[in-house]
């Protein structure tokens, strides 16, 4: 079964699976330089890591990119010019307050379907599509039940694993996790696997990540599907509502929903500090740092990561940040 | 009083202005000696070399008095629209109404250079969290906050979607500090697939009928907002007239480019051509006058070509320039190194194409917006660049990276590869900050090497 790699949370895995192909939302291990995206100043290390690792994998049959940021939009140029891997650009609108934006997203999902057909997929019957959505919804329900049971980062790793493989690890844990450290939130762009080591640093210095609001964490899970539809209703519209209409993104214009989501989560989890993780050259998150500092009621630590190493300086800054909150 | 074409300094322009005055120079309302702009803080002018024609004097004066025009428009009650990012589309709509002025706050891009960092706009942007890792357009944020560069617009519109991250992020920051923005979506242009109705766009790109329709609907939202601000409907007739008027400006500019870039000897320097191209995107806040200014330049160029006069000699290397330079001084530098500009893509070459007049006007504007090279792939943009290089007969290409710009890192290598593969021309990539003084020796070396490569190739041929 063809493996279709992607990184953007606005790509519904369900549609790929419904066409009989294997969706895999990849988190690269780091910002690897080997592949079509070489050493060029100004390139986001996450984009580089994603493209290079997807291209390095012999299992990947096609790559889906989206327009949520210019770096990813332009990554398609690398794929077209420097590789033979088929790729698809999903136009995810930045605006979201008009019915046209949602309609555009719906039409883009249908267009993605045609691409998947070209990749060897079979268009699903309507009821088969609903069944796949039910199956994903069930699994995500199980995932959600791990929130608060697993430490936030293990919860994120479980989400990452599910996104990559469609499988949920059996944790064997059912007692809620109660951290003893200072409750902190992570927010920001997506994390490479290497970046998860930052969380270890936080733990070492006495912090507890209780909310992962990065792009790889729970923030980018779609809403639960509404199955009270008639079986003849269009499942793509429901997918669009639950992905495009629900996931708060930094790229949205305006991106007020992201702030609303944050406010809700920070208040309910009684968070005392926020760590923002952003990749070098990621303008969308970088521009939010100052605004977040003005807006948040708790202190914010801005961590820039370059995809190569976690930099000793970051360790010192995390330590100082947590000490100051103690 | 017609002299041989030459580049002269600001001080020399002072003397020349006196002579022109004495000989009865007819002056437009914004006329006057160029040196007076130094008092407004435009210190970079003192380091530039200018064309010595009266047409160039009018061009510079027209450009450097835009701020005064905007404040004057505010005083007489004209509605002012700050249109951001689309480069060439919304102003056509706005100028279809008599009492509306549209301008690009993005134009502050050049303020740090022109004012040699004295304006403080970058410092304000820094203080709001937008440091030098962003494109120089961050100066716009400083300009809004300092309120010193343009009147606060009555309406702000911004295109988002298939745009650079820099602009989208900066505009969101602006919105976050309290400036309401009407966002409209520009799609990533794509080629038609099976089942799509293909649409041929001005400039040669293709997209689909659905994409045109979507963008048309987005532009309708902007149109409604302008109408409600102005209290007047933008009827199809008015818009058609607006498109016709914009096409008049575009036609003059196209002819100017054709004549200047294909002439045996360069009839007008790079800097004046850059400014002339900029006028097209929003008419420098006065559409009628922009026609007069550009027509003056075109007449001067015709005169020079007819007389066989020009600058830099006939062996100057014909260079195609990609992306605008943050420091205008670098355009002079290319000429000092032995080059001349024969073709440009300063990120808005779609604004030179004629807007279709044989389709509904809103559809025509949507097609224009989708024809922007920056909303499609770098492959598309590279192809247009290659076509233009062939048309203008350029011998070498300079890709000028814009510091911090999200598109430059990925685009530059692709454009360079395409030019080398398709045309076999030498390409050099440089990066130009807003004040490039410290880098001028290094830039000089790179540009000279490019020029020498071309000249060596000519000898071999
Ligand atoms: S981290 Fe930022 S720049 Fe990089 S791919 Fe994600 S959104 Fe784009
Ligand atoms: S120069 Fe490039 S990065 Fe800067 S605003 Fe223009 S398109 Fe965006």
Image: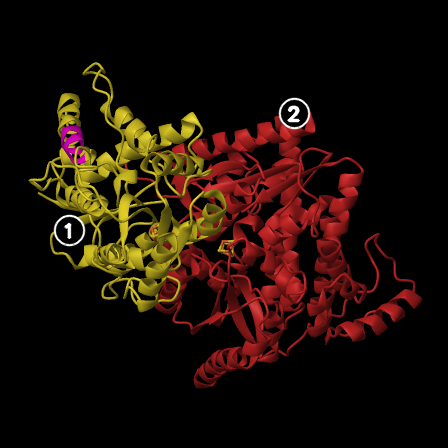
Occupied quadrant, residue A298: top left
Chain B shade in the render: red
Q: Which mark is residue B233?
A: 2
Q: Is residue A326 visible?
A: yes
- Residue A66 falls within the magenta-colored stretch: no
Q: How are the residues colored?
A: by chain
Occupied quadrant, residue B187: top left
- Residue A140 falls within the magenta-colored stretch: yes
Q: Is mark 1 within 8 Å of ligand 1?
A: no
Does residue B91 sit above or below B387 in this rendering? above
State the residue position of label 1: A60
From this viewpoint, which residue is outermost toward the top? Answer: A230
Chain A shade in the render: yellow
Look at the image and give the residue range highlighted in magenta: A137-143
Q: Residue at x 13, y 46 (%)?
A: A3
Element class at badge 1: strand
Label 2 or label 1, whichever lies nearer to me, is: 1
Q: Residue at x 32, y 54 (%)?
A: A75
Front residue of A71 and B385: A71
Q: Is residue B234 visible?
A: no
Q: Tell me where residue A76 appears, x and y as whole percent.
A: 31, 52
């Amino acid at each position: 079964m063809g493996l279709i790699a992607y990184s953007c949370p606005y790509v519904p895995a369900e549609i790929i699976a419904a066409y009989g192909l294997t969706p895999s939302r990849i988190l690269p291990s780091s910002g690897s330089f080997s592949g079509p995206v070489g050493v060029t100043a100004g390139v986001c290390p996450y984009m580089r890591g994603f493209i290079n690792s997807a291209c390095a994998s012999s299992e990947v049959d096609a790559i889906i990119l989206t327009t949520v940021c210019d770096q990813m939009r332009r990554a398609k140029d690398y794929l077209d010019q420097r590789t033979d891997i088929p790729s698809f650009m999903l136009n995810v609108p930045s605006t979201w307050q008009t019915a046209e934006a949602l309609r555009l997203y719906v039409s883009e999902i249908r267009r993605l379907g045609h691409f998947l057909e070209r990749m060897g997929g079979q268009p699903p019957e309507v009821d088969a599509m609903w069944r796949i959505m039910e199956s994903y919804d069930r699994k995500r329900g199980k995932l959600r039940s791990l929130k608060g049971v697993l430490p936030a980062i293990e919860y994120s790793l479980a989400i990452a694993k599910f996104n990559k493989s469609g499988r949920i690890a059996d944790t064997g844990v059912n007692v809620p996790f109660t951290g003893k450290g200072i409750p902190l939130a992570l927010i920001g762009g997506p994390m490479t696997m290497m970046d998860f080591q930052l969380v270890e640093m936080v733990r070492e210095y006495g912090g507890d990540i209780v909310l992962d609001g990065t792009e790889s964490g729970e923030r980018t899970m779609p809403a639960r599907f509404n199955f009270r539809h008639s079986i003849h209703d269009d499942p793509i519209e429901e997918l669009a509502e639950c992905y495009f209409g629900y996931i708060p993104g930094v790229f949205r214009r305006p991106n007020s929903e992201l702030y609303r989501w944050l406010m809700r989560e920070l208040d309910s989890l009684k968070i005392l500090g926020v760590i923002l993780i952003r990749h070098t050259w990621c303008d969308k998150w970088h521009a939010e740092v100052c605004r977040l500092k003005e807006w948040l009621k708790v202190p914010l630590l801005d961590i820039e990561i370059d995809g190569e190493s976690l930099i000793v300086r970051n360790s010192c800054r995390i330590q100082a940040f947590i000490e100051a909150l103690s | 009083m017609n002299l041989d074409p030459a580049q002269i300094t600001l001080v020399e322009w002072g003397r020349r202005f006196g002579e022109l005055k004495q000989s009865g120079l007819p002056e437009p309302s914004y006329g006057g000696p160029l040196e007076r702009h130094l008092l407004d803080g435009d210190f970079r002018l003192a380091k530039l070399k200018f064309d010595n024609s009266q047409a160039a004097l009018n061009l510079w004066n027209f450009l450097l008095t835009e701020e005064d025009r905007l404040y004057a428009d505010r005083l007489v009650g004209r509605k002012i629209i700050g249109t951001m990012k689309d480069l060439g589309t919304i102003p056509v709509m706005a100028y279809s109404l008599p009492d509306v002025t549209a301008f690009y706050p993005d134009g502050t891009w050049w303020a740090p250079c022109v004012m040699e960092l004295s304006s403080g706009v970058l410092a304000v942007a820094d203080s709001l969290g937008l440091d030098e890792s962003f494109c120089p357009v961050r100066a716009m944020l400083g300009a809004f906050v300092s309120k010193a560069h343009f009147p606060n617009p009555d309406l702000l519109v911004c295109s988002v979607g298939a745009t650079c991250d820099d602009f989208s992020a900066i505009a969101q920051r602006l919105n976050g500090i309290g400036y309401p923005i009407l966002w409209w979506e520009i799609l990533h242009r794509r080629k038609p697939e099976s089942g799509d109705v293909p649409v041929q766009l001005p400039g040669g790109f293709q997209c689909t009928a659905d994409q045109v329709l979507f963008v048309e609907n987005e532009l309708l939202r902007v149109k409604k907002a302008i109408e409600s601000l102005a209290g007047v409907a933008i009827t199809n007739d008015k818009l058609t007239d607006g498109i016709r008027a914009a096409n008049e400006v575009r036609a003059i500019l196209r002819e100017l480019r054709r004549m200047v870039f294909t002439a045996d000897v360069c009839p007008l320097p790079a800097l004046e051509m850059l400014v002339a191209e900029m006028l097209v995107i929003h008419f420098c806040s006065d559409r009628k006058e922009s026609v007069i200014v550009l027509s003056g330049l075109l007449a001067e160029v015709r005169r020079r070509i007819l007389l066989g006069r020009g600058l830099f000699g006939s062996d100057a290397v014909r260079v195609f320039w990609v992306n605008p330079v943050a420091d205008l001084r670098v355009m002079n530098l290319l000429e000092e190194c032995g080059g001349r500009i024969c073709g440009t893509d300063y990120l808005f070459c779609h604004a030179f194409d004629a807007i279709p007049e044989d389709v509904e006007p809103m559809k025509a504007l949507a097609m224009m917006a989708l024809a922007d090279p920056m909303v499609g792939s770098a492959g598309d943009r590279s192809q247009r660049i290659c076509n233009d290089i062939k048309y203008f007969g350029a011998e070498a290409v300079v890709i000028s990276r814009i510091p911090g710009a999200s598109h430059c890192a990925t685009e530059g290598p692709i454009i360079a590869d395409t030019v080398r593969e398709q045309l076999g021309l030498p390409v050099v990539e440089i990066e130009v900050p807003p004040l490039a003084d410290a880098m001028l020796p290094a830039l000089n070396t790179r540009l000279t090497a490019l020029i020498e490569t071309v000249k060596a190739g000519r000898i071999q041929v």
